Amino acid sequence: MAERSGNDEALRRTSVTMAEVGRLAGVSQVTVSRALSSPEKVSPETLRRIRDAVNQTGYVPNAVAGALASSRSKLIAALVPSITNIFYSSSLQAFSDIMREQGYQIMLSETGFDPEREEAAIAAHLSRRPDAIMLTGVRHSAAARRMLLNAGIPVVEVWDLTETPVDCCVGFSQGAAAEAAADLALASGYRHAVTVTAGNERAQRRRDAFAARFETAGHGPVERIDLGPSATLGLGREALAQLVERGLRPGTVVFCSSDQFAHGILVEAAARGLAVPKDVAVIGFGDQDFATATEPALTTIRIDRQALGQAAATALIQRFAGFPGLDPVHDVGFELVRRGSA
Amino acid sequence: MAERSGNDEALRRTSVTMAEVGRLAGVSQVTVSRALSSPEKVSPETLRRIRDAVNQTGYVPNAVAGALASSRSKLIAALVPSITNIFYSSSLQAFSDIMREQGYQIMLSETGFDPEREEAAIAAHLSRRPDAIMLTGVRHSAAARRMLLNAGIPVVEVWDLTETPVDCCVGFSQGAAAEAAADLALASGYRHAVTVTAGNERAQRRRDAFAARFETAGHGPVERIDLGPSATLGLGREALAQLVERGLRPGTVVFCSSDQFAHGILVEAAARGLAVPKDVAVIGFGDQDFATATEPALTTIRIDRQALGQAAATALIQRFAGFPGLDPVHDVGFELVRRGSA
DNA sequence: CCCGGCAATGTATGCGCATACATCAATGCT
DNA sequence: AGCATTGATGTATGCGCATACATTGCCGGG
């Protein structure tokens, strides 16, 4: 495996150690260690010799040994439901960009919205002794919570808020966001509502909050179309098709758990010659990049996913720096963006 | 940090070790090690006591120490250009699902299509002594290649093919895929072509191959619209708008570097009352989930991203098992999917 | 001229585990 | 009965580094 090489001086199989580098530079292992981690503590001449030796041997520090010795791994565990879901991947991207700048690397696992998988992943990750862990959501199995508490490392839970985080959380109120959408729909005079919801708990909480608000206002019952775990344009189209077949009442607004569904509804409406928002109004969720470019543009709930990931990273960094008391609950909010579709 | 606890017996700060578990179970450290890694070598009674002790203490194995002692980390490094890009995230998902089943965990970094960032990420990852590494693309800096070869671990490069992989590669021919699209366009009678291309090297190779084929057939020159790094529906719309302003010739086909662009062109065409494929034909790339649900459905090049990730994982697993000679180059192919848009 | 202080380097140690090897008792075989 | 074999466990060791502490030489002030 990777056996070509040969063109290099450095073709050992057993990897180079600090001690070998030191031997070559005429110093001890510890001086090499210092030269790499705090060069100002080593004389310029020695530093030069050590750097030469490093280059000559192709030395790559063994961070495993370093982590064992120092009990700081510079690794962050990150658990997301799904990396193919732009919600999570884009906030993870912002999160890991900041962490990388600080010299941390990311160990990633997907949980598939499954608490059992999450629990297994937490156990696996904790055995690597990460310096911190990022979780998605605030609901975890009892065993998971126990492991996290015992680990004694900073923990940040993202995307949801709770009064009782394991350590701290960064998110927004799903309920408040959905209620804001309901209020907008009511204020705009829509009197019939349908929810189109993906099969995950966060989306369902929004659905329920939207429906409750709408029905409390005396306009109900809200019809619910619950779909599978993945939010696709095609499923959105089918949802509207189904709705039309069952008889679409004028003044109906459709509240979607993601912009993909909403977009599908727009496409299907266009294909059927229905006018949006006149014949059917649509509210999305997420404000994804295409939301401004649909026809009409999507009214949706914007979550600043970048900011969410950054806030999560910042929370951990603050904890590393020893400000554990700082804002255990951080609300990044949401923004209802009114465009053409509702 | 995570200081609540208290409700548990196990509220130490310095984490439990095998030796402590052993003390509690009345055996030595090594017996605990055996009980966990090969329980069949330990008597049932001892095993029971050890398991009790593990539960009682909330023992979490320290994989860092394990890795140092055994020089097997059960970690896989994975480098992708961008996790928010569904191309890479979905094949990464398939890749890591298989790896997880085999007991491996993933360390992830993004390279942003930047060889320098890639090189830095490779160095950082190799210091963690992963058991293998997955890279995207086959072009790497000289230093990166050297480090990879010196590391002496299996390396798999995905998404592209080359005769000279560092170790092995799994992908398809970008050029052949683009040429197939050009052939379809030519066979369908389109005589003018435009490319709409995102700012990354793989997309550009497809653009060039498409244009070359089209022009070689005597129909040129192919007009090129080169856009930024991210492929969005909005940019696709703008591309068509720009094209129309410059005077869209009848019988034009637009070859896009991604389905997002293609979708944007469909949306803009609809908004302008242009018929697809009559007034303008569109070929996408990727066969993303929405490609069947657009109006009309997208003609596109399908890449089986799942299969790609799985093949990459399989290649590594085979190498672990000691079949290093097996297919250093694995072509997963592509499929031209003809739907309504061209 | 002597001593305190600092800069530069070295020595010793252990992080928590896997692994090679040793021990010991029980068992089977001739 | 004697010996090899096997099962169950223990002892010793070191992976490669960080860290606490020790050492050495040099400089300047009193």
Image (cartoon, coloured by chain):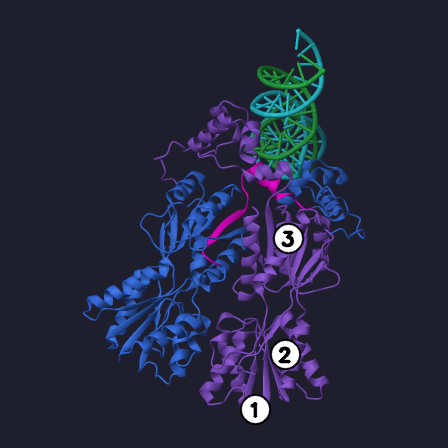
Chain colours: A purple, B blue, C cyan, D green
Of pointers 2 and 3, the one earlier in the residue sequence: 3
Q: Which residues are magenta?
A: B60-82
Choose between B222 and A339: the one closer to the eye. Answer: A339
Instruction: Provide the chain ID for the residue under circle 2.
Output: A
Q: Secondary structure at mark 3?
A: strand
The residue that label 2 is drawn on is A181
Q: Which residue is mark 3?
A: A133
| Residue B10 visible (yes or no) | yes
Q: Tell me: D17 left or right of A219.
A: left
Distance from disc 2 to disc 3, alpha carbons, whole Å, reads 33 Å
Task: Depth check: give the residue in front, B329 or B267.
Answer: B267
Corner quadrant of residue A221: bottom right
- In the displayed structure, would residue C13 be above or below residue A340? above
The residue beneath circle 1 is A248
Alpha-carbon neighbours of circle 3 within 10 Å: few (<14), some, or many (≥20)?
many
Asked if the stretch drawn in magenta spans residue B97, the answer is no
Disc 1 to disc 3: CB gap under 8 Å: no
Taking the spot 27% from the left edge, 72% from the top edge, the residue there is B193
Spatial separation of the CA atoms under disc 1 and disc 3: 47 Å
